[in-house]
Image (tube, grey):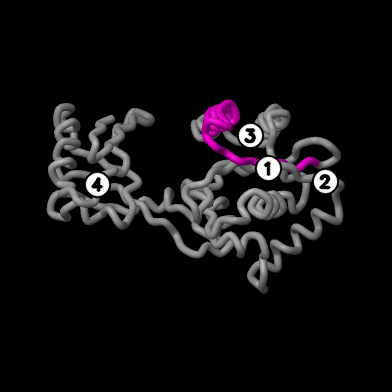
Amino acid sequence: MALDQDYCILLCTFRGATYALPPLIRPTLDPIPILNKVSAVFHERNKPAVFRAIPANMLSYFPKDKYKITPEREIWDYLYRTKDLIELRGRKYQQKRNHINRFRQDYQFSYNSLTPEDVQGCIELYHQWAADKKNSPEIEEERLALKEALENFSALALKGGVIRVEGKIQAFAIGSRLNKNTALIHFEKANPEFSGIYAAINQFFVKNEWPNTKYINREDDMGIPGLRQSKKRYHPLCMIEKYLVVEDS
């Protein structure tokens, strides 16, 4: 990490690859000298500078004659109107309304904001959800992230919600406020044996925990086809584009 009163640069190493996250630079500064400092760190390792998750409004920092810019579609965020996810109005949301109505009719359930007493039930549900998934690094990474989030729930200013069916937690969601207008949804898991429960936790969580926001960012789809289709079915307002930027060698 490089930290100055005018800028902050974070370097990450993930699965053996090192890259810089979007640089935080005071708008009045010329970004080129700062980016050159980042490049120097990579050059010391005989590698070109790599920046990941660069938003579209930062691409002007990177001259096209010096950097190769590639869309990273799998990490584009889905942005929705909060009102749309709560009200689910119109024909395009008919299926979601049907799922929630069926869930309400078929099961004895309750919704409540996530409390410390719910932590173990959420962990158990995650293990149940992951049991039939392939033993992949992504599952283990998400499990560790969930564990850290639950252990530091208050310090991270998180909010959560759980659905119990016949007294047992069968769905949960966890998010945080990005800014005064937008909330982020970090985790959403449910037992698919209960028809309509995913649509239910999606609506209940936003309606109960984030009604005063304007937008909901449901983060990316990781390039997983099923997850991509699921997020598209909620008709995002727009996508938050992000790019891979690599220094030409």
Q: Which residues are magenta?
A: 142-164
Which residue is drawn at the image coordinates 62% and 44% (left, top)?
188
User: N-terminal of the two: label 2 or label 1?
Assistant: 2
**In the image, what residue type sits under mark 4?**
Arg
Frontmost of labels 3 and 2 is 2
Q: Which residue is mark 2?
A: 109
Q: Is residue 19 above or below residue 108?
A: above
Asked if the magenta segment contains residue 151, the reply would be yes
Is 101 on the left or on the right of 225, as rendered?
Answer: right
Q: Which residue is mark 1?
A: 161
Crowd band around label 3 with a 10 angstrom C-alpha radius: few (<14), some (14–19), many (20+): some
- Can the viewer see residue 210 in this picture? yes
User: N-terminal of the two: label 4 or label 2?
Assistant: 4
Q: Is residue 86 above or below residue 219?
A: below
- Can the viewer see residue 198 in this picture? no
Residue at the far bottom in the pictured view? 91
Q: Quadrant of residue 176?
A: top right
Frontmost of labels 4 and 3 is 4
Which residue is drawn at the image coordinates 56% and 56% (left, top)?
213
Determine the secondary structure under disc 3.
Answer: helix
Asked if the magenta segment contains residue 161, the reply would be yes
Q: Which residue is mark 4?
A: 26
User: N-terminal of the two: label 4 or label 3?
Assistant: 4
**In the image, what residue type sits under mark 1?**
Gly
Q: Are marks 4 and 1 in contact (CB under 8 Å)?
A: no
User: N-terminal of the two: label 4 or label 1?
Assistant: 4
Q: CA distance from mark 3 to mark 2?
A: 23 Å
